[in-house]
Image (cartoon, helix red, strand yellow):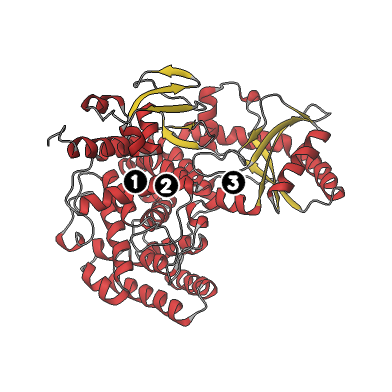
Amino acid sequence: MLLSYQPAHQRARCILYTTMAIQDELLTKAREKFPADDDYDKIVAAYEFADKNHAGQKRLSGEAYIIHPISVALILLDWDMDRDTIVAGLLHDVVEDTNTSLLEVEEKFGHDVAVLVDGVTKVGQARAGRDDIDTYLPRTKDNLTKLLVATGADVRVIIIKLADRLHNLRTLEYQPRDKQLKKARESLEIFGPLADRLNMGRVRVEIEDLSFKYLMPHKYAELKKTIDTRISRSKQSLEDVRREVSGALTREGISFRIDGRIKSVYSLYKKLNKHPNIDEIYDLIALRIITDDVTSCYLVLGVLHQMYQPLPGRIKDYISRPKRNGYQSLHTTVETPKGQIVEFQIRTKHMHEYAEHGLAAAFHYNEQKVGGGSYSSKGLAPMPKELKWIQDLQCAAGKLRAGEKVDLDDLKVSLFSDRIFVYTPKGDILDLPAGAMPLDFAYQVHSDVAAHATGFTINGKIARFDTPLKSGDVVEVITRRNVIPHVDWLNKIATAHARDKLRSQLKKAGRLKE
């Protein structure tokens, strides 16, 4: 069947397993993913340790508590995460919810696992941390700050936390209404955007739909019914289009697979806020074509445009110019001879996997931890360019651990505001938050270039230092060797990165005292 829509919370509904059944599922999947005895035995040991320490604890659903950490570990296994991440997923609540100390976790499972457990515990705490969980991460003022700092210490922390939040949202029905609203609002405002920044599209959609269902249940039900109705009306005609396209691509000798994508309830809600006429929302249902390579993507696009009339302004090339989070795909909306409007998304298998799972698909940790960059403090494969913002978190975490002052409010603004793409005169693309100004651009290029900035041109015209940049702007930095940074530049920047670099330069020059 081409299209079969169920909301995310129904597709991944957490059934009330018996402990034995979910334990068997965990051990079976762990053995499949980690055939080596050392890896598998460590996961089994973590399960047994968690089971022993959570013994007697219950969730509000009435389940044994151990089902929650096992469910988190199963999600992480589905995301193909490394062994230590799976182990930390099983252990993520033992320090906070039992008498287990972080030192005991480290002694039994190693330093890396302890850092991950410490980070997830930090993120989840609503109160000040206990002494035994402050070993690796500093105390911080609020949950979002804890999240940012813990993520900076090791990005796998946020992967575990997303899995933890996902399972909690799937079982949110058992919480009192006030807790439902709090968790749903926090998930929509923080965890959804974080999943998006990590390009974990499938996770983002499920978080958003589950949260929206609890925050606006009547609107959710109304839009879900709308989607169901339109799918029912369009199913046969879309199946006809699918057969036509499949035949054409087969005749061209292109290897492909084709399926359907249904717009999520929350995405439709946001779209209707901008475009109230649902008949003008052409991507409610889309056909997705997945090919072997980039060349085939463009060949498919050509075939589609020979078969159907493309709509002006509806062709988007996110392969040559990826979205800010690394998403790549070709999008085109066409009109068939029968007058049906259809959106197509075309991508490679690799692009599709990355679009679905993002960071979790972008790298896999290994025991050798080789590579020139660092996703964590241990040093792993080089960071994909679209995830360089994680290095800002790592830098902030390092400074806090060293007792240095960090403006985390600015960091939050940089991470959670809308983003813009700005170009250098050579065509390089820089990703900046909306509201960024030329000095933010300059410090992103290089701090030495920014330090000697005497002016800027935007799209070939002289611009003021406090001119807000827009996506697509081409910015050039005009420099002079005798120019030095000014204190008043602090009022003409918007990003934490630029402010941090400028403050360092001003202090070094003796022009700023703190």
Instruction: Describe the element under mark 1 as helix, strand or loop.
Output: helix
Residue at image mark 2: 388
Give residue 32's mark.
none
- Residue 17 appears at what percent x and percent y? 46, 65
Task: Looking at the image, tell me whether mark 1 or mark 3 is earlier in sequence order.
Answer: 3
Q: Residue at x 20, y 68 (%)?
A: 99
Crowd band around label 2 with a 10 angstrom C-alpha radius: few (<14), some (14–19), many (20+): some
* Left or right of 125, for residue 308: right
Whether residue 319 is visible here, answered yes or no, is: yes
Residue that appears at 48% across and 53% down: 359
Amino acid, disc 2: Lys
So how many labels did they put on this image? 3
Which amino acid lies under the numbered mark 3 shown in the image of this protein? Gln
Tell me if residue 110 comes above or below residue 173 in the rendering.
Answer: below
In the image: residue 308, left or right of residue 265:
right
Residue underneath mark 3: 6
Of pointers 2 and 3, the one earlier in the residue sequence: 3
Residue type at tag 1 = Asp
Residue 190, by quadrant, is top left
Return the residue at label 1: 392
